Amino acid sequence: MNNERIILLQKFISEEPQNPFNKYALAMEYYEEAPNESLKILEALRNEYSEYLPLYFKLAHLYWDFEKWNDADEVFIKGIDLAEKQKDIKAISELKSAYQNFQFEND
């Protein structure tokens, strides 16, 4: 976790509150070392920008890590549906592969 980068991202968020990338980037800064903070940001981002596709992969994995199985399942499915709607072939593939791994591990 890079505190200087966190401060810079918070500045970007205050300057461009309508840009979901800055909030996503901040969540990624917290992802490894402060997953609860990352989860909180990603959940807020999903509520605010449900069409922002990159958040679904990481949010589903955080739910998975926290053993919130139903939430992870729901987010994977919504992410796959959104990726298909946006015709993002790479995201479809990544989300489907991760979802299959999730299902396999939680059977």
Image (cartoon, grey):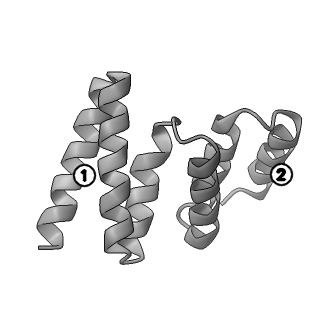
Number of residues whose C-alpha sits closer than 10 Å to that of mark 2, classed few (under 14), some (14–19) or many (20 or more): few
**In the figure, residue 94 lies in which quadrant?**
top left
Q: For the view shown, which residue lies furthest in the bottom direction?
A: 67
In this figure, which residue is indicated by the disc labeled 2? 7
Kind of residue indicated by mark 1: Ala
Label whose residue precedes the other's in the sequence (1 or 2): 2
Picture coordinates of residue 106 (x, y %)? 18, 73
In the displayed structure, 60 sits above or below 81; it is: below
Q: Which mark is residue 98?
A: 1
Picture coordinates of residue 24 (x, y %)? 61, 45
Residue visible at 38% across and 55% down in the picture? 75
Picture coordinates of residue 48 (x, y %)? 65, 45
Residue visible at 31% across and 72% down in the picture? 69
Q: Secondary structure at mark 2?
A: helix
Q: Which mark is residue 63?
A: none
The quadrant of the rendering that contains the C terminus is bottom left
**In the rendered image, is residue 29 in sight?**
no
Badge count:
2
Number of residues whose C-alpha sits closer than 10 Å to that of mark 1, classed few (under 14), some (14–19) or many (20 or more): some
Between 57 and 9, the one lying in front of the other is 57
In the displayed structure, 17 sits above or below 107; it is: above
Residue visible at 23% across and 54% down in the picture? 99
Mark 1 or 2, closer to the camera: 1
**In the rendered image, is residue 51 in sight?**
yes
The quadrant of the rendering that contains the N terminus is bottom right
Kind of residue indicated by mark 2: Ile
71 left or right of 10? Answer: left
- C-alpha distance separating marks 1 and 2: 32 Å
Q: Secondary structure at mark 1?
A: helix
34 left or right of 32? Answer: right
**In the figure, residue 21 lies in which quadrant?**
top right
**In the figure, residue 39 lies in which quadrant?**
bottom right
